[in-house]
Amino acid sequence: MNCGFDVYLVDQPQRGRSAWHPAHDNQLRNTSVQRVEKMFTAPEQFCLWPQAKHHSQWPGKGRKGDPVFDQFYASQVESVASDAITERNLQQSVAKLLDKIGPAILVTHSQSGSAGWAIADIRSLKVQAIIAIEPACPPIMEHEVFGGKMHLRWGVTHNAIEYSPPLKNATELKLIQEIESQGDDLSHCWLQVQPAHQLPNLANIPVLVLVSEASYHAAYDHCTVQWLRQAGVNVDFIRLKDLNIRGNGHMMMLEKNNIEIAGVVIKWLETHVI
């Protein structure tokens, strides 16, 4: 907002101020104190993935009883248990918002990352750019820390997205996994067998994928980038550690150096969009 943007902060349908109703809506889930500590606020104390040891930017001890942690945890609300339903509902609601307000830059983070691709798929002319901050899971399979199960069946989305040549079902995607990873502590990516189906509705939208040094996403966000590039999407990929911005986790926007990170995003926008 300080940079002159009109900002729409969107509550996911059936979450936060967008009320959930037990008679009509879907099963909910919540996030435990332990999960928040391990994944977001104090991963360096648990080291569930190799990069976690570098985490240092959370403003506090990151554990229950610390006032910063308690304030953050108090802000957490239940969400619909099905990521596919959340993605579909968010796609439909944001598409309607874009119809009202006109073209906009989408900024997504974490779970909402898959919805960003889905929104752009049906409103490609109204999405000026996508800034995907550690978006969702890697293509096809979850990371081992989450169990390594099949997840994003359509590559970068849970629900159907338009490919060319067209697909009737996600099972028509022909897949191959890297034999060797691209570096130490990096996931083996799933890709399409060539020639790859393209994502035509995303092809003309500038995309930034940004990942921190210490998040669990540091192990696999390059896989999302590879999938998108293989499918014809114009993607820039920034690892904050390559800019000497160190120690951040998945909730980088709440951490001590968040203004420095925001500057990286603004600089990218000035180059590619504004």
Image (tube, rainbow, N blue to C red):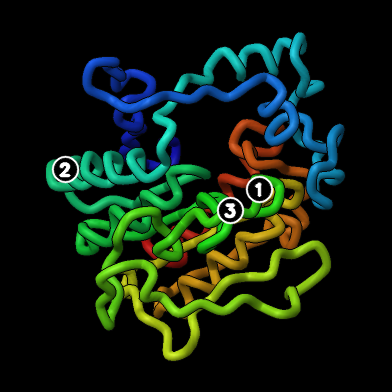
Mark 1 in CB contact with mark 3 (< 8 angstroms): yes
Contact check, label 2 and label 1, Cβ < 8 Å = no
Position of residue 254 measured from the top left corner of the image (x, y, whole percent):
62, 31
If the image is split into quadrants, where does the N terminus sit? top left
Question: How busy is the neighbourhood of tag 1: few (under 14 within 10 Å), some, or many (20 plus)?
Answer: few
Q: Nearer the viewer, mark 2 or mark 1?
A: 1
Task: For mark 1, give the secondary structure.
Answer: loop
Is 28 situated above or below 149? above
Spatial separation of the CA atoms under disc 2 and disc 3: 33 Å
Image vertical order of residue 132 relative to residue 223, above or below: above
Q: Say which amino acid is labelled 2.
A: Lys
CA distance for labels 1 and 3: 6 Å
The answer to whether 124 is drawn above or below residue 48 in the figure is below
Q: Position of residue 249 (x, y in %)?
A: 70, 41
User: Which residue matches tag 2?
Assistant: 96
Residue 165 left/right relative to 50:
left
Image coordinates for residue 53, horizontal then vertical, percent:
86, 44
Residue ID at (84%, 41%): 47
Residue located at (30% from left, 68% from top): 169
Q: Secondary structure at mark 3?
A: loop
List the residue tagged with mark 1.
147
- Give 155 or 257, whichever is nearer the viewer: 155
Image position of 75 with respect to 189: above or below? above
Q: Quadrant of the C terminus?
A: bottom left
Spatial distance from mark 2 to mark 1, Cα to Cα?
35 Å
**On the image, numbered disc 3 is attached to which residue?**
149
* Residue at x-position 22% and y-position 53%: 103
Q: Nearer the viewer, residue 206 or 174?
A: 174
Q: Quadrant of residue 184?
A: bottom right
- Position of 99 with respect to 202 (left or right) is left
Q: Which of pointers 2 and 1 lies earlier in the amino acid sequence?
A: 2
224, 269: nearer the viewer = 224
